[in-house]
Image (tube, helix red, strand yellow):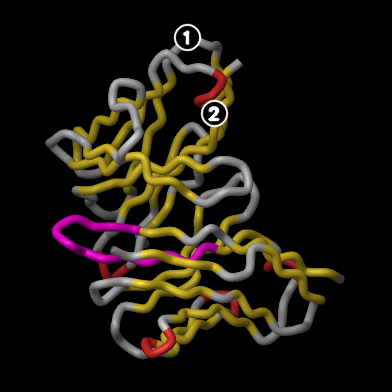
């Protein structure tokens, strides 16, 4: 079985300060891991993905995440927040076990203060 | 690349009527598409996996007669909410992948309001 835990349901940062959104996972198989962003009443946009290549993954809009197998973590970071980063962020684990299984975290709402 | 188009974006319907939502992969073929439901301020809940040319696989607790899924071609899956009721009001999102290692692309979602 696999699961995803997003440890921060709400995060508020000031513009220009770093962003950290935490994600821990559990999986009986080698997972693929993704971070998606969702703006209000919009679909999900892929920020970055880890699929067993480099453990430090760089995505769009200056975001990056590091896969740490020993800690079963895949935290999302950005050095300097922008107002446009305010949105909901989802950590997703994908495992193929004969059928594709996508597991979503509960989401992290990021607020960026001016 | 890997664009998924979902229509309509917004729909308001009367209670008892049916609503069809379309999900298209524009630049790739998708033998499998996924349908999700999202309640306000919550994460996505997988409703069903749509398989081209065969029956959809529904998640536990999802009424297959209520949420009809048709995946008649490699680029189109439809979700029909039959005899809609106010409790069916929600945000519905579809997803597909051009390949497992390439990630999943999501449609822009459909806001359904049943009055």
Q: Tell me: residue A79, above or below residue B106.
A: below
Dividing the image into 4 quarters, which one contains the N terminus of chain A? bottom left
Dividing the image into 4 quarters, which one contains the C terminus of chain A? bottom right
Q: Give the range drawn in magenta.
A: A90-102
- Magenta segment's dominant SS is strand
Q: Mark 2 falls on what kind of element?
A: strand
Q: Tell me: residue A97, above or below residue A71.
A: above
Q: Residue B99: image x %, image y %?
A: 24, 64
Horizontal side of residue A71 vs B73, given as left or right? right
Q: Tell me: residue A94, above or below residue B27.
A: below
Chain bearing tag 1 is B
Q: In which quarter of the image is residue A57?
A: bottom left
Q: Residue B12: image x %, image y %?
A: 58, 21
Q: Nearer the viewer, residue A98 or A53?
A: A98
Q: Is residue B59 magenta?
A: no
Co-location on one chain, circles 2 and 1: yes
Q: Which residue lies furthest to the right in this view?
A: A114
Label 2 to label 1: alpha-carbon separation: 13 Å
Q: Mark 1 falls on what kind of element?
A: loop
Q: Which of B61 and B41 is in front in this view?
A: B61
Horizontal side of residue B62 vs A111, given as left or right? left
Residue at 37% x, 67% y is: A93
What residue did someone put label 1 on?
A: B16
For residue B112, which numbered disc appears in the image?
2
Q: Residue B34: image x %, image y %?
A: 32, 46
Total residue callouts:
2
Q: Nearer the viewer, residue A22 or B115?
A: A22
Residue at 45% x, 43% y is: B93
Residue at 13% x, 36% y is: B54
Chain bearing tag 2 is B
């Amino acid at each position: 079985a696999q699961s995803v835990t997003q440890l921060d349901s709400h995060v508020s940062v000031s513009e220009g300060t770093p962003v950290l959104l935490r994600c821990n996972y559990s999986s009986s198989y080698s997972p693929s891991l993704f971070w998606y962003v969702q703006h209000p009443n919009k679909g999900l946009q892929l920020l970055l993905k880890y699929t067993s290549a480099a453990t430090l993954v760089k995505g769009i809009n200056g975001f990056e995440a590091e896969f740490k197998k020993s800690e079963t973590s895949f935290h999302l970071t950005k050095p300097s927040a922008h107002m446009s980063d305010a949105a909901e962020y989802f950590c997703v684990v994908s495992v193929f076990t004969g059928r594709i299984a996508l597991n979503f975290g509960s989401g992290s709402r990021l607020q960026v203060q001016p | 690349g890997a664009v998924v188009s979902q229509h309509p974006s917004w729909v308001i319907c009367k209670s008892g009527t049916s609503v069809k939502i379309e999900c298209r992969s524009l630049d790739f073929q998708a033998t499998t598409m996924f349908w999700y439901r999202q309640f306000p301020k919550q994460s996505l809940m997988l409703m069903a996996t749509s398989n081209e040319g065969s029956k959809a696989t529904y998640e536990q607790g999802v009424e297959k007669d209520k949420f009809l899924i048709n995946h008649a071609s490699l680029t189109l899956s439809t979700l029909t909410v039959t005899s809609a009721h106010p409790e069916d009001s929600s945000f519905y999102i579809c997803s597909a992948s051009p390949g497992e290692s390439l990630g999943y692309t999501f449609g822009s979602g459909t806001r359904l309001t049943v009055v």
